[in-house]
Image: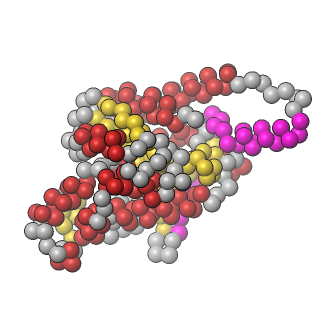
Amino acid sequence: MKYFWTFLILLALAGAAVLFWQAQAKPNQTAAKQESAQTADKKKADNELTPTEDIVSEEYSISTDDRQLYGVITAPRDYKNKNLPTIVIAHGFNNTLEQYELYSQLLAKQGYLVYRFDFYGGSHLSKSGGQDMLNMSVKTELTDLTQVMEKLGAEPFVDKGKISLFGASQGGVVASLYAAAHPDRVHKLLLIFPAFVLFDDVKETYRSLGSPALDQLPDSMTHHNATLGKIYLIDALDIDIQAEQAKITAPTLIIHGTDDSVVPYQYAVDASQTIPNAELVTVEGGEHRIDERFSLAAAPAIQEFLKE
């Protein structure tokens, strides 16, 4: 992701400016507060963003019956004593959590708890396993994300009512499917060039194989320059993505470039018109990467979207 750092720096600066303004606008607490009011203020403070340079990154893996999902929490150092708004990052196709390290650090410095993890089979470099990618599909990744959300939602340091999802490319599809299935669990949904095209791409690959009966599909095949198992096609063919988009109730921000050759811009337009509470930010000339052009449009939009 060329110029990715530029994007994150812009995001951090925008966030710092907003937080500074909010801090200046807040009235000082007086010593005359009654004990009940002080308790309420304490609880409110634990749920508010507090900028800090003192952050930590700690391994936080999630064990299931058949696998362990490797992940990392990045948050203010005292996060275990708080109840923080949380952002869960879902990475894209053949990607890993490592791509979002600096982004996580900058958001944590604004007061968020950020969790990123590797999907099982999501990449040849996945620390969660399945590096051959033969047992991965959008449905298996949806299962992974569901397990992550359930585990995090049970933690005392996570504000269960303010868990937002950040999904990039295929991760945007998975995040959308989760938001559709669990509308009460997603505070906000942020989608960076979500790969809604993948369902048409899968149909094209299926036709190129002669449209056989699903049980006659080859065990492995080449799709988007990667060797995948037949489960990838079978599961995608079973999803009506427009019907799923229509179920999403969380406020949704879609950021997409007009020159994206991997996921054509029209898919973002269509999604913004199908998702009931969606806003589309258009990056003129933007491609399927976060570069300087993309950053200039995306950074202020993300900051504004994440504000309460």
Residue at 70% from the left image edge and 25% from the top image edge: 26
Depth check, front residue: 37 or 85: 37
Residue lying furthest bottom in this view? 215
From the viewer's perspective, tell me whether residue 29 is left or right of residue 258.
Answer: right
Based on the picture, tell me whether residue 81 belongs to the magenta stretch.
no
Count of all numbered marks drawn on residues in the image: 0
Relative to 273, say whether 248 is above or below. below
Depth check, front residue: 120 or 38: 38
From the viewer's perspective, tell me whether residue 261 is left or right of residue 125.
Answer: left
Q: Is residue 140 visible?
A: yes
Residue 275 placement: quadrant? top left
Q: Which stretch did the figure color magenta?
A: 34-63
Q: Quadrant of the C terminus?
A: top right
Residue at 34% from the left image edge and 61% from the top image edge: 138
Relative to 226, say whether 31 is above or below. above
Relative to 18, say whether 86 is above or below. below
Relative to 205, say whether 48 is above or below. above
- Rendered location of residue 67, percent (x, y): 46, 71
Residue at 51% from the left image edge and 50% from the top image edge: 186
Based on the picture, tell me whether residue 42 belongs to the magenta stretch.
yes
